[in-house]
Image (spheres, grey):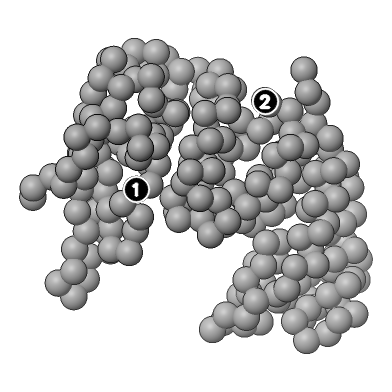
């Protein structure tokens, strides 16, 4: 069985340190970066708060401290957890080929469940995510309870997807619970604009994963039948 190349995973994480720091309306306190959440970083070495957005020496000092943290990690999951949550799918895209099947499945499940909007990730398309799920081993991808629910699914059933304003209708995240879909559809309603709920029929053989948060069914749009908007 393939083993994780931990050194390769660490090297990729270190390369992320050198990605450009993007400004936000709240910079330097809040920045866009795969590792740094803030442009003001605490140095464990000196005990100082350092502005890494306007001083290259400060930035390099913090980079070196993060490199040391990566080097201390004993597995890929520990490295992954040092990457910002919103970049987890992107990081997984770069490290996938270096992971054992078990670690890949564990990280895919975590990234999917804990990302705010994995269905519209800028670097991982729904088609690519569906491919990953099809490659995954469900015995690693889902926990014991989730596997039990999956095993008891009927051969064919109805699922729902709440499509909020500006959200992707062809996403992979569906649910068996219409009330949950309603919540996702309407949580961003404003100024007379509203989301909507889709329903579809799915065969169990096309279920990519089941996650017990929000009774989620992961399913590729092209594998669904009778997709339609549910009347309010």
Q: In which quarter of the image is residue 186?
A: bottom left
Residue most extreme to the left? 232
Mark 2: few/some/many CA within 10 Å (<14, 14-19, 20+)? some
Secondary structure under badge 2?
Answer: helix
Residue placed at 72% from the left, 52% from the top?
A: 82
Q: Is residue 45 above or below residue 99?
A: below
Q: Which of 35 and 195 is in front in this view?
A: 195
The residue at which mark 2 appears reads as 102
Question: Can you give x and y, in whole percent of width and height, for residue 132 in the image?
Answer: 56, 35
Residue 223's label in the rendered image is none
Please give left or right for residue 98 compared with residue 24 in the image. Answer: right
Q: Nearer the viewer, mark 1 or mark 2?
A: 1
Question: Can you give x and y, in whole percent of width and height, for residue 150 in the image?
Answer: 39, 19
Residue placed at 52% from the left, 32% from the top?
A: 133
Q: Is residue 83 above or below residue 191?
A: above
Sequence-wise first label, 1 or 2? 2
Residue 170's label in the rendered image is 1
Residue placed at 90% from the left, 80% from the top?
A: 57
Quadrant in which the N terminus appears: top right
Question: Can you give x and y, in whole percent of width and height, for residue 213 in the image?
Answer: 40, 36
Number of numbered discs visible in the structure rendering = 2
Residue most extreme to the bottom? 54
Question: Can you give x and y, in whole percent of width and height, for residue 144 in the image?
Answer: 50, 17
Secondary structure under badge 1?
Answer: loop
Q: Distance between the residues labelled 1 and 2?
A: 28 Å
Q: Are marks 1 and 2 in contact (CB under 8 Å)?
A: no
Please give left or right for residue 215 compared with residue 12 in the image. Answer: left
Visible residue check, residue 199: yes
Q: In which quarter of the image is residue 203?
A: top left
Residue placed at 28% from the left, 58% from the top?
A: 164
């Amino acid at each position: 069985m393939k083993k994780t190349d931990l050194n390769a995973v660490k090297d990729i994480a270190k390369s992320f340190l050198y990605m450009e720091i993007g400004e936000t309306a709240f910079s330097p306190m809040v920045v866009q970066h795969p590792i740094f959440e803030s442009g003001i970083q605490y140095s464990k070495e000196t005990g100082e708060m350092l502005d890494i957005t306007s001083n290259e020496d400060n930035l390099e000092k913090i980079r070196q401290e993060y490199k040391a943290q990566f080097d201390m990690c004993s597995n890929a999951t520990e490295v992954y957890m040092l990457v910002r949550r919103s970049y987890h799918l992107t990081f997984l895209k770069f490290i996938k080929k270096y992971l054992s099947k078990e670690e890949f499945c564990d990280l895919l499940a975590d990234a999917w469940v804990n990302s705010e909007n994995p269905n519209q990730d800028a670097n991982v398309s729904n088609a690519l995510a569906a491919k990953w799920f099809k490659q995954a081993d469900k015995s690693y991808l889902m926990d014991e309870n989730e596997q039990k629910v999956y095993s008891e699914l009927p051969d064919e059933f109805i699922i729902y997807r709440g499509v909020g304003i500006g959200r992707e209708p062809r996403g992979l995240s569906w649910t068996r619970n219409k009330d949950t879909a309603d919540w996702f559809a309407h949580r961003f309603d404003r100024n007379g604009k509203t989301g909507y709920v889709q329903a579809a029929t799915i065969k169990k053989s096309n279920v990519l994963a089941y996650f017990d948060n929000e009774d989620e069914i992961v399913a590729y749009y092209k594998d669904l039948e009778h997709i339609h908007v549910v009347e309010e």
